[in-house]
Image (tube, coloured by chain):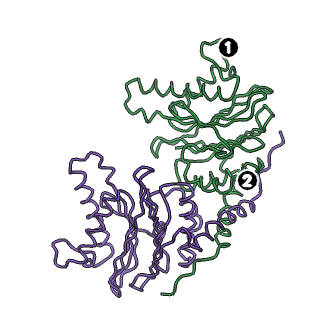
Chain colours: A green, B purple
Amino acid sequence: MTYCVGLRLNTGLVFMSDTRTNAGVDNISTFRKMQCWSVPGERVITVLTAGNLATTQAVISLLDERTKAHGERNPSIFEQPSMFQVARLIGETLREVIAEHAESGQRADAAFNATMIVGGQIGLGEPRLFLIYPEGNFIEASADTPFFQIGETKYGRPILVRAFDPDMSFADAIKLLLVSFDSTIKANLSVGLPLDFQIYETGSLQPGEIHRVERDDAYFQTISHGWGDALKIAIDSLPPYEITPG
Amino acid sequence: MTYCVGLRLNTGLVFMSDTRTNAGVDNISTFRKMQCWSVPGERVITVLTAGNLATTQAVISLLDERTKAHGERNPSIFEQPSMFQVARLIGETLREVIAEHAESGQRADAAFNATMIVGGQIGLGEPRLFLIYPEGNFIEASADTPFFQIGETKYGRPILVRAFDPDMSFADAIKLLLVSFDSTIKANLSVGLPLDFQIYETGSLQPGEIHRVERDDAYFQTISHGWGDALKIAIDSLPPYEITPG
């Protein structure tokens, strides 16, 4: 499994992903699930991937090759005029890769599936954030739904639902995401450290901080240990139930 | 879906279940998923059920009928000498009901599956807590794994993992469970109010408080509203990430 989140803040976008992939419990590897392409001053595009690793790597490789080979018959995400067209192109590429694998005689086509979060900004357009389905179609984050999760989403969702605020700073958003990821890692073996995150500030048109959080990262340790204590204090701050005398 | 939890505390057992059942999103009903049988002074047995409603109702009805009809050819949970034998009997009953439905020509046998939590105390034995699988086999809660969840378990798990303590009082356990259920209800439409809970105090050999938490329950409202604020305070108590200047 995998866990990735993309947040749409009022000041920009924040992305975080884990790096664990597994086929069974005895075949565990570390792969980056976050990819960023940029033309400084013109566009920044970040993609998070969850699902079949062969599928997601094929999609990322296809997209990447096309940014380097000009004049190919297939369009590049660098040639798209808007984030909407970028999402459409990535969705089409994803659908084609899945279809190709499924058509090659394999029956377990569900196993080739993948889901993606795509975010970024092009020129004078607004920063936009999309969730792309295996079928190639996609939805966009809005004021009502300002973040997307993919992969093993359930453990880390309650804290996002309660504490996410589009007005929050990048610093607070990273903190919130680390709590959400830590809760997931503590409950599920298929999500694991290290974590990658990236910040994109609206209008900068260049990648913000890109950071890998290793197991011994001092800030992550502070959050992981501190959160247990903070939760206990939070629980203690609520009144206990009054047992009806038997 | 469903969400049920059984906790093993040092002072006894606590059970909580939601009441929503659904077949699709437009066929929603309320059913009790907690059943308690007792012979005061001799035994108390509580069962929580998740999965196919026809299966769980059939199992509960069979178990219930046999407690009332003495001398039947099938044994009753009232005749078992230990909680281990009770768990075995319930597991066998569950497996038989699933097999009966599956053998009747229906192919979707997975859809008949159900899982159960069984807890209680008989005579001088210790209170025991079991998780029963659709295959009829089961595992028992221990000091390492002092609680079981069934149904939609993921959303409410992180808070249990972090804050559960077998030394906690019944009053604090009810509070913790309400937080876990509230987090699940906020994130998933298939788990819904009202909630049922039951307390069993070690050695009492009679059911403790059994309570239904309705939507307008004052204590639940306090916890549900208070938890959002308490979480924000908890998050604020941790230091924000220090963004590396770009």
For residue A26, side relative to residue A38 (left or right): left
Q: Secondary structure at mark 2?
A: helix
Q: In terms of sequence position, does the residue under pointer 2 or pointer 1 come before the other?
A: 1
Residue labelled with disc 2: A219
Residue A11 position, x and y percent, is: 78, 43
| Chain under callout 1 | A
- Depth order, front residue of A40/A29: A40
Relative height, residue B241 to residue A42 (above, below): below
Disc 1 marks a residue whose amino acid type is His
Please name whichever residue, A212 or B7, is drawn nearer the observer in this view of the structure: B7
Q: Position of residue B119 (x, y in %)?
A: 39, 73
What's the distance in space between the residues labelled 2 and 1, CA to CA? 42 Å
The tag on residue A70 is: 1
Q: Secondary structure at mark 1?
A: loop
Q: Quadrant of the C terminus of chain B?
A: top right
Question: Do the residues at discs 2 and 1 belong to one chain?
Answer: yes
For label 1, count other residues whose C-alpha is less than 10 Å away and answer few (under 14), some (14-19) or many (20+). few
User: CB atoms at circles 2 and 1 under 8 Å apart?
Assistant: no
Residue A178 on image: x %, y %: 67, 51
Side (left or right) of A171 relative to B81 = right
Instruction: Tell me if B55 is positioned left or right of A36 in this view.
Output: left
Quarter occupied by the N terminus of chain B? bottom left
Q: Which disc, if any, is residue B12? A: none
Residue A106 picture location, percent across and down? 38, 28
Q: Which sits in the foreground, B166 or A217?
A: B166
Residue A32 seen by the camera? no
Residue B177 to residue A39: above or below: below
- Circle 2 marks a residue in which chain? A
**Residue flagged by tag 2: what amino acid is it?**
Tyr
